[in-house]
Image (cartoon, grey):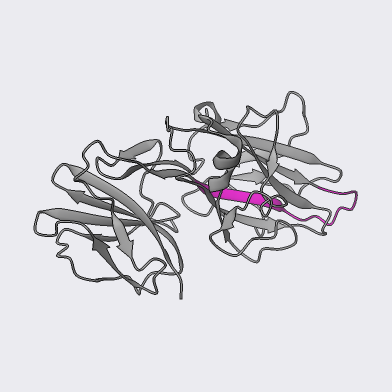
Amino acid sequence: MKKLLLSLAMISLVSVCSGQSFNDFIDFERGMSSFNYLTIDRISNPGNIWQTGVPGKIIFDSAYSKTHAIVTDTLQSYPVNSSSSFIITHLRPDNSNVGNESLQLNFWFKINTDSLTDFGTIEASIDQGKNWVNLMTQDSMYQFRWMEIKPVLTGNSNGWQHFALELRSLTYELGYSDTLLYRFTFTSDSIDNHKEGWMLDDFQLVDYWEGIDDNASNTALSIVPNPTAGMIRLDFVDASKNNCIEIINNSGQLVFETNNYTDKLIDLSHLKNGNYFLRYFCEKKTLTGKFIISR
């Protein structure tokens, strides 16, 4: 097992002070009958090559974590002149704070193709698939924010790469929707070089938004500096009370925990660059925040 994963599937974390976060974590470890969030259409496209299972190819020889992933065929190279898609449905919590929301798509992937005309496409829809936004080509139009280097979904990824995109402006521009669809399409040309295609694993679908509490005396969690090179502190929290801090990375892994925060700097210099979620527990209160490590 490559990663020790914190179970985040369908858990809603509600802050009584500042905001809410909602995370779907998907690792494809259950049978297909349990995947009510996953659609692989083999009715309109009988040749759809997407499969969930244990990868058994030369390059795609294991999942990112545990045993299962979603792959353009778990055993065979991808065929020529193919176009195959799967859709992930993200059911979102009710929220009226459109514009104050952080909407994120995170996952790990490998890609192995023979040319620029064999490639992957990722789209999003907030109207049940009537209209789609191409996340790779319309990212500038909608001012999406890449939280890591924008990946290339063709050629050879040379190992696992992390996809991390913030789509805050998607709901800001198009309006709130309680159902968000992500469509992943792999397209191949007429040349067969026996490549392995596209493999994805460990999805984290994130909604986080700031709200206004009914109790005006409560203050939002503030993490400073943000971004940080490795040292952070929390402002506006009462460190004299019993408290606990947990920090989770984009893969859902618990990377830091303390039961004795005393308003001092927290040294996170051992963590890699990337986006992190912080949960602060104090008596009956839970506050959540996010920050970036960048050096």
Residue found farthest to the right: 190
| Residue 126 picture quarter | top right
**x then y, percent, for residue 87:** 63, 35
**x then y, percent, for residue 249:** 40, 57
Front residue (pair 201, 261):
261
Q: Which residues are magenta?
A: 188-204
Front residue (pair 258, 43):
258
**x then y, percent, for residue 38:** 57, 33
Q: Is residue 270 left or right of residue 134?
A: left
Q: Residue at x 30, y 58 (%)?
A: 222
Q: Is residue 18 left or right of residue 276?
A: left
Q: Quadrant of the N terminus?
A: bottom left
Magenta segment includes 107: no
Residue 285, can we see it?
Answer: yes
Magenta segment includes 189: yes
Give the answer, above or below, for where 53 lies relative to 126: below
| Residue 24 picture quarter | top left
